[in-house]
Image (cartoon, coloured by chain):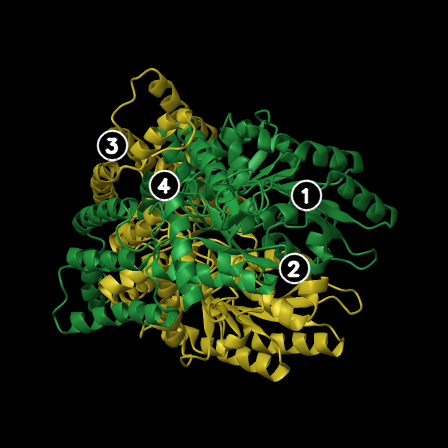
Chain colours: A green, B yellow
Amino acid sequence: MSNLPVELTEAQRRIAAAYDPALLEDAGHRLITLLAANLARAERSEGAVLPWVDPEDGIQEAASWLRETAVSAAAGTQPELPERLADLVRTMLARGLNLHDPRYIGHQVPAPVPLAGLFDAVGSVTNQVMAIYEMGPWATAVEQAMVRELGAAIGWAAGTFAGTVTHGGALANLTALLTARNVAVGDAWEHGLGCDRPRPVILAHADAHYSVARSAGILGLGSRQIVPVGLDKQGRMDPRVLDKEIARLQAAGQPIVAVVACACATPTGAFDLLPDIAEVCRARAVWLHVDAAHGGAAVLSDRHRHLVAGLQRADSVVLDAHKMLFVPGLCAFVFYRDKRHRFEAFRQDAPYLFDPAAPGLAEYDSGMKTVECTKRAAAFGLWGAWSMFGRQLFADMIDVTFALGRTFFEKLAAADDFVPLHDPQCNIVVFRHIPEALLGASPERTGAFQLELRRRIIESGEFYIVPSKHQGVGALRVTIINPLTTPAHLDQLMEALRRHGRELLAG
Amino acid sequence: MSNLPVELTEAQRRIAAAYDPALLEDAGHRLITLLAANLARAERSEGAVLPWVDPEDGIQEAASWLRETAVSAAAGTQPELPERLADLVRTMLARGLNLHDPRYIGHQVPAPVPLAGLFDAVGSVTNQVMAIYEMGPWATAVEQAMVRELGAAIGWAAGTFAGTVTHGGALANLTALLTARNVAVGDAWEHGLGCDRPRPVILAHADAHYSVARSAGILGLGSRQIVPVGLDKQGRMDPRVLDKEIARLQAAGQPIVAVVACACATPTGAFDLLPDIAEVCRARAVWLHVDAAHGGAAVLSDRHRHLVAGLQRADSVVLDAHKMLFVPGLCAFVFYRDKRHRFEAFRQDAPYLFDPAAPGLAEYDSGMKTVECTKRAAAFGLWGAWSMFGRQLFADMIDVTFALGRTFFEKLAAADDFVPLHDPQCNIVVFRHIPEALLGASPERTGAFQLELRRRIIESGEFYIVPSKHQGVGALRVTIINPLTTPAHLDQLMEALRRHGRELLAG
C-alpha cells in the first residue's frame, strides 16, 4: 500500500475499518429495523410527541457521546461498532420530535413520506452533490426533471421557464429577490446599492413571511424598505390598495424591486388573488414574486388548484417540497417564468469550476444559480417518492389535510369554548380556547392563557401545536401537515386543551 | 376514521400504504444491501469513476421514471413497491459519481465516512429539523455539542464563543460577512447601504473563494468593492501589504467591513500566516474573517495544527465538515470568537416562531442565527461518525490525505513529463503534464492541452480530477480527499494521463 510514512500505516488501518462495506451493511440493517419500529410506534401514538428536555441537558448528553468513545476506545472496551451505532440511533430517536405521530400538527414541516428519506440517504451515503454537472450528474438530472414537471404543473410551456432547488424557503425567497434586485437596479451586483436615486423598495403582503423582510436586510436594501400592502378581511393582499401604492411610489420616482404576494400567507394560510395582483404588476411593469412555499403544491390537486390560479403569471415563484409535498427538509424550488433570468442572481466566474473546454455544460452547473456552491442532491426524496407512488399521492395528501383543516374549523365553530379566528382555505387553522372562566377577560389575559396552555400541552408530550398571534393577541395554531391525522385526533386535541386549561386555571 | 368527505377514504387508504412501517422496513433493507454492494464495488474500482452521460439524456431518463409510475399504476402492472425502490436505487447508483472509488481525487468534496450518511438518514426519515428548539431538540443538542467541541479545538474558552451550522461554505461565508457588515455599518440592516459615506469595502486574499466576492454582490456592497490583497510567492496573503492597504483605506475614510484570510486558499491550498494577519487586524481594529472551510479541520491533527495557528484570533471562522471532516454535504460551521455577535446577522422577530411564554429558549432557536428558517439536522453525520470512531479518525484522515499530497508532489517532481506548480501544504496539488511533444509550446497551447486532457480522462471514467488555472494558464488539479487513495493510484493516474495525452496528440 505504501510509500506513505510508516507511522501512517496504523491510521490507514483505522480508516479502512471505518470505510468497510461490511460495516455499512451490518450497521445499516440495524438502522432500518430501528427506523421502522420507531415509525410504527410513532404512528400508533405510543410515547410522547415531543420528549421535552431542557436544551442544556440535551447538549450535555450529546457531548457525552462524543467523549465516551474516546474513553472506551482507549480502555479497549468499545462495543462492537454496529451495536454502538444502534445505541446512538436509539438515543436520536428517543430524543427527537415524532412528526409521524398523528398528534403532531404543528409548524409547516410535514410528517414526510418515509421512503423519501431513504432516497435522500442514497445521496448522503454516496455524497452526491452538485455545483457543476459532472460532480452530480444524476442529482442534476433529477433536479431538472422535477423542475420541468412542477413548472409544467404550474402552467408554463416546456423550454420557456427555468428553476433550481435550494436549501429552504428563506434561501429561495432570498435568491428570487436577489434576481429581482439585480434586474431592477442594474449595477447593484457589481457596484452595490447606489445613492444617486431614491432607495429601492419591495412591496409585500403585510403578513409575508419574515424571510422577505430579512432578504431586504441581507440584500442591502434595508428591512425597513419593505412597504407593507394592506389586506382585505380574509387576510389577502388587496389588489386595489397595491395598485394605488405602486402608482404613488412610481409617481415619486421610487424604484420598486418587486411585489411579493403569498400563496398562502403564513399566519392563517390565506391565498392572495393572484390573477388580479398579476394584472396590476403587468400593467405597472413591476416584478411579481409569489411566495408559494406552502400552497404552491396545490397545483397538483384538482380540488384545490383554483387557490393558485394565476401563479403562472408570476415572474418568480418559490415552492417548498418540504412542506406540502411531504418530503424531508430541505428541498425548496425557485422558478423563473422567463428562463432568461436564470443567471441573473449571480454574475461571476470561478475558473476552476466552470470548464472552458466544455462551455455548454454551464447550463447544467447549479452553482451558477444558487447561493450554495457545493449543494446536496436535495431533490432525491421528492423524485423517489414521486417515482414510487406517482403524482396521485401528492394530490391525496393535499386533499386530505386541507379537508381536515375544514373539519377542524367546523368542530371549533360548533364548540362553546373554542373560537376559530378565520375561515381556513387550507390546512392552517388559528383559534383560541376560551373556557367559561375566561369569558370577558382582557385581550392580554386571553392571549397569555393561549400561550401558557400551548407550552403546557407540548411539554406534556400529548400534542404538538404552535403559538400565534391574531390581531395582536395570543392564539393557538395548527398546521395539519401529517396525513395520518384523523378527525378523531382533533377531538382528542380539543379535549386535551380543555383538561390542561382547567389545570392551568386551577394552578 | 372519518367524518372526512367519503370520497377521501380511498385517498386515506393510499396514504396509509405509503406510510406503512412494514414498507419502510422491507424497502430499507433492500436499500442497505444495494448501498453496501455499491460501496464495495466503488472501493475496488470496479466500473467507471464517473459514468459520463449527456445532461439532457440524464434529465430525460429521470423524467421517464416519474411518468412510468403513473402509466404502470393505471395499467395495474406496478411492480411490488420494495422492488420498485430497488430499481430506482440501482439507477441512482449506476448514474452517480463514485466518490468512494480511490481514483476520485477531484473537488473539495470527500469520499465520506459511509456511516455518517446513515446518521443523516435518521434525520431524513424522521424529518428532524431546526429553526426553533422544540422542533429539533436533539438536532439542536447535537449541533451545539459539535460547535462546543470544534470551538474548543480551535482554541476558544468554553462560554466565550458561539457558532451555528448552515448549508455550505458559501452560505457560511455570506452569514459571517453579513454579521461583519452589520457591525461595521450600523444601520445597514434596517436602512440599507447608505450614501453619506464612501462605500464600504472588503479586503480579501487575492485568491479567496468566489463566494466572498459573491457575498459582496448579495449584501449590496458590490462585488467590485472587494479589494484584493497581494500574495507572497507561496500564494499567501502578505501581511505587510495588508497593513499598508488598510492604512491607505482608513486614511481615506473608507469603511472596511472585514479582512478575509484563507486557511487554505482554493487554488493551491496555501495557508495564510494567521498570527501576522490577526495582529494587523487587531492593531487596525478591523474584523478578521477566516475562510477555513477546507483547512480548519487541521486543528484536529497534531501533525498539521501548526498550519492554522492563530485561527483563534479571528472574529469569525468558517469550517466545512463536508470537506476535511469527511461527512456528506452540507454541514458548514460558522463561528464567532465573541459570542455577543451571534445574533448580529439578523435582527428580526417572527412572533409565531419565537415564544414569549419561554423567552429564554430563543438562545437555542437556530432560526435566529442562520439564513435558513427551517433547517435540516445537518450535524447528525458528523456527530454520529465522531461518536462511533472518536476524534482520532478525523486526525487520521487529515494526516493520510495531506501526506499523500506531499507524496504526489514528489512523484511529479521526479518525473520528466510532469511539472508540479507549487509546494503543497495540504492535499491540494496543481500540476501540468508536459509530454515531450509539447515542450516549448505556447502557454495557450499548453493550457488548452491540460483542459482537453482532463475532459478526456474524466469522460473515460478512469479518474476524476479537476481543471484549474495557474498564472492564467490551464492546469490540472487534484484534491486527495478520498482517504482510500494510495500512492499506487497516483502512479496509475500519471500513467493514464500519459496514455490519454499520447492519444490526444495523435488524434
The amino acid type found where label 1 is placed reads: Lys
Please tell me if label 4 and label 3 are on a single chain: no
Q: Which residue is mark 3?
A: B82
Q: CA distance from mark 4 to mark 2?
A: 44 Å
From this view, report whether residue A464 is shown above or below residue B183: above
Please tell me if label 2 and label 3 are on a single chain: no
Report the front residue among B104 and B462.
B104
Please tell me if label 1 and label 4 are on a single chain: yes
Task: Give neighbour class at mark 2: few <14, some 14-19, many 20+ (Cα, 10 Å).
Answer: many
CB under 8 Å between discs 1 and 4: no
Q: CA distance from mark 4 to mark 3?
A: 31 Å
Query: Where, quadrant-wise, is the N terminus of chain B in this rendering?
Result: top left
Is residue B482 toward the left or the right of residue B207 in the image?
A: left
* Disc 3 element: helix
* Disc 2 element: helix
* Disc 4 element: helix
The amino acid type found where label 2 is placed reads: Gly
